[in-house]
Amino acid sequence: MQLPVVIIGSGFAGYQLAREFRQLDNQTPVIIVTADNGDDYSKPLISHGFSRRLSADAMIQKRCDALAEELAITILPNTRITSLNAQNKTVSYGDEIIAYRDLVLATGAEAAIPPVRGDGTTQILTLNSLQEYRHASKTIVDKQRVLVIGTGLIGTEIALDLSLANKEVWLVGMTEQLMGHLLPDFISRELQQRFQSSGCQVMTGLTVVELTQSDSGLRVTLSDDRVIEVDAAIAATGLRPRTALANAAGLRINRGICVDACLQTSSPHIYALGDGAEISGTLLPYLQPIALSAKALAKTLAGNRTDVVIPAMPVIIKTPVMPIQLSGETSGAHLSWLVEHTDNGMIAKAYIHEDKMVGYVVTDKQIAQGFSLLAQLRATA
Ligand SMILES: Cc1cc2nc3c(=O)[nH]c(=O)nc-3n(C[C@H](O)[C@H](O)[C@H](O)COP(=O)(O)OP(=O)(O)OC[C@H]3O[C@@H](n4cnc5c(N)ncnc54)[C@H](O)[C@@H]3O)c2cc1C
């Protein structure tokens, strides 16, 4: 009997790998085991879900059954793998054991919940999966005042989206500026001004210390002792790669599941990709690196061992009041900036040495310039 390639996880990483592998090999059995219902959906759409009034079902691109048929693979939905035996090359759930030829951990990451006191913390919503969005959208639909904790990329996008959906929004984060790890301060400030103009209250340099249930909703105490009343709270305070299975099986983990350039873990025949993987020391929780990882890993699984090569990638920030695209090094005091302000937005180029551009940020209609800047960046890398 031919042993299967087993993929754990049906997010973008798991399904993209199955698609790429099937283009190279339509014989080897493939089994995808997933803790969720296995429907294929677009996670980035969650950032527009509230303002566009999208139901969770509207984000589904293909149902689990249809995808299994299209790719000629077996999908086991609503099935959580609970142990991995690298020696015997098996994974198991309940009393069931699946033997594999090669195993791929595409188990993603969980939304981190900030350490907040109070009986309201059980009400904190997260948005890192379709199930979480389904629950959050039902909870929020008839609520007006929403707290978003976290001023990173996802928190910022979600806060603006709720504001565009006519909610009253407070965006609170511990860093001094919006998306401080991605944006230079002059662009962050401009974005914050536009947020305030659109009605979203931005409170930077603060943490939420307590969340308690009150008669009218949730009482939020901030680190400067200010108190606000909201009806719902969402945390977008980062991701924690799911490493428990790998850890228990003795694989090397750090922040994520450690893999080499071929996406192999510290154990032969076990690979990892997606939000849960740490590739040569780096976490890359974005679609494009995952798509490149899936392409390379499919080749490896088809017998042609291939390194994943990840060039400078564009990051698109989905904030309609100020669309932004960036790539390369774009934050930090070591950078010097050449900034062009135009009626159509900003073009900001980051330099370390006078002649070497190491990153760029373009805004509004100038995002059209992003692709030629990206080509320049790649050419000088
Ligand atoms: C709101 C939002 C907007 C985003 N927008 C963008 C964007 O515009 N551009 C961009 O590039 N990226 C964006 N991202 C990031 C991007 O969506 C993710 O990097 C990507 O979807 C991660 O896919 P994944 O398959 O690695 O993980 P996941 O989607 O988290 O999938 C993990 C899978 O593993 C399964 N699983 C976990 N443990 C087990 C187990 N023990 N047994 C069985 N199954 C298990 C889960 O059920 C799930 O199916 C966004 C993310 C969010 C949250």
Image (spheres, rainbow, N blue to C red):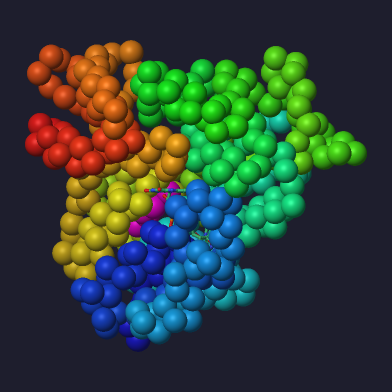
Residue that appears at 39% across and 52% down: 274
Q: Nearer the viewer, residue 60 or 187?
A: 187
The answer to whether residue 146 is above or below residue 18 is: above
Identify which residue, 364 or 253, lies in the foreground.
364
Q: Considering depth in this image, is 102 or 17 the residue closer to the camera?
A: 17
Residue 122 part of the magenta-drawn span: no
Residue furthest out toward the front: 343
Is 74 displayed left or right of 220 in the figure? left
Residue sitting at 38 percent across and 23 percent down? 187
Question: Is 201 placed left or right of 317 in the picture?
Answer: right
Coordinates of residue 168 in the picture (x, y in percent): 67, 37
Q: In which quarter of the image is the N terminus?
A: bottom left
Q: Position of residue 347 (x, y in %)?
A: 25, 27
> Image quarter for residue 20?
bottom left
Q: Position of residue 345 (x, y in %)?
A: 31, 30
Q: Can residue 329 be seen in this view?
A: no
How many labels were placed on the picture? 0
Q: Is residue 273 magenta?
A: yes
Measured as percent of width and height from the top left, residue 57 is found at: 56, 68
Q: Answer left or right for 282 relative to 109.
A: left
Say which of 88 and 28 sits in front: 28
Q: In this view, does 303 lie to the left or right of 14?
A: left
Which residues are drawn in magenta? Answer: 271-275
Q: Which residue lies furthest to the right in this view?
A: 215
Q: Is residue 342 above or below residue 80?
A: above
Residue 289 higher or lower than 177, as above or below: below
**Residue at image x 24%, y 19%?**
339
Q: Which residue is rendered at x = 10% and y = 31% of the image?
A: 380
